[in-house]
Image (cartoon, helix red, strand yellow):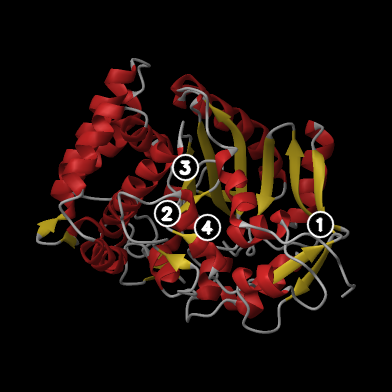
Amino acid sequence: MVNIISNKLGISDLRKIFTAGIKISKDDFYVGAEYERLPIYQDDFSSVKYHGINGICEFLRLYARNENWDYLLDLDNIIGLKHLHDTITLEPGMQFELSIKPQKSIQEIEKRLKKFDDSLFQLFDEFGIKLLSYGIYPKTTYKSIPILPKRRYYLMANYLWGILSDVMMRETAGIQACFDFDSEEDAMKKFRIANMLVPIATAMFANSPIRGCVDSGYKSFRALSWLNTDNDRCGYAFDFNKDSSFNDYINKVLDVPLIMINHDEKIYAVNKNITFRKFMEEGYEGLSADTDNFKLACNLYFPEVRLRRFIEIRNHDCVGKGLQYSLFAFYKGILYSPNILDKVDEYLSKFNKKDYTELRYNVPKLALNAKLSNITIKNIAKDLVQLAKDGLIEQQNDEEKYLEPLQELVDEGICPADIILKNWYGSWNKNIDKLIEYVSCN
């Protein structure tokens, strides 16, 4: 590495990354959607390859030409596409992620996602590819999934520890929801409450029980994989402290070991145990810390809820059949209604971090039958969905209808995985074809 001279980075410099997200008013609040799905070949249900005439690279090349999108490249490899504020990106196992420009309404999110699907599905059919709204590849496991040719992913695969880190990277798909804030206090309040909500939402949307063509014994094998991936950078960001600030989050990231450093479009693996804090203080092999590398460190930190210029809520299995919109509606009803946010805060704050940590470890297997302290989650879920509905009614955007698919499930005390398992041992007779048909988007 070359010797770089720069002024030392300070906490005040890093705070600007987060304060830049503060909105002037609640009228500026939007909802961001990141929707990962699983591409498989129609003939044998194996995961889609990167290379070849029917590979995802060629698909992206043709889609870009047909729809006038631009390439996202890593060296000479196409790793995604971009059009204005919308992106298509590939995860390490070729999982297909669509990130749309944040929208004011769930109606607009639905409209845009459906429009993209209309343009995607015809070409997918020509390639013999099905896209699945499911949390894990139902047939192919990571040993048969070559990693996407992206430098960052190679370094992550070599670095991340945990017995299921390869499963997490190469097999799983989820949905992430992003929300705004209008002050540091508002950000940290929403961040804290979102951390309490997310294991309950993980249970409500659990949708990955069948893996490798067999019942895994878990309703969300995806959530299990996150429990067994690099505890230095996964889990909860910090205690649910009502006095927390941006500085607390920054200090947490500063103490996470570095995986890589980026300089002049070159990526360097960090070959010894060094945190970003130590990088700031001492440099690393001639390089000095800068805000771009802190942003990279933040992107390689994977807590249940991540703080950026917005709040990113992460740990949900991919779902379809309208439940993807229920997910956005659930959080919007709570986080964007101050009255409801306070009610949910009061409801959930009677439990402590130990309770939520134990819940997080029990949800992958039990989903809504897991307990928070001594209360079964299915009962808490009913109350929270009703509160989210009340919040959406208060917002007067006619969006409470998007909670209906979720409402039907929680009223019965079940999650998507329960329906799949009932059919798997019933009318499907453990036939993987039936599962594929059930979770296919096209």
Q: Residue at x 82, y 45 (%)?
A: 71
Q: Which mark is residue 177?
A: 3
Which mark is drawn over residue 317?
2
Judge by depth and name the residue closer to the eye, 269 or 93.
Answer: 269
Residue 426 position (above or below residue 335): below
Residue count near mark 1 (Cα–Cα under 10 Å), binned few <14, some 14–19, many ≥20: few
Tell me whether circle 4 and circle 2 mark residues in contact (CB < 8 Å): no
Say which amino acid is labelled 4. Answer: Ile
Secondary element type, mark 3: strand
| Mark closer to the observer (2, 3) | 3
Observer-nearest residue: 109 or 417?
109
The answer to whether 408 appears left or right of 295 in the picture is: left
Position above or below: 220 against 205? below
- Type of residue at label 2? Asp
Q: Earlier in the sequence, mark 4 or mark 1?
A: 1
**Is residue 43 at all visible to an observer of this figure?**
no
Quadrant location of the N terminus?
bottom right
Measure the C-alpha gap from mark 2 to mark 3: 12 Å
Q: Where is residue 215 in the image (x, y as percent from the top left)?
A: 35, 70
For residue 369, the mark is: none
- The residue under label 1 is 53
Q: Which amino acid does label 3 sit on?
A: Ala
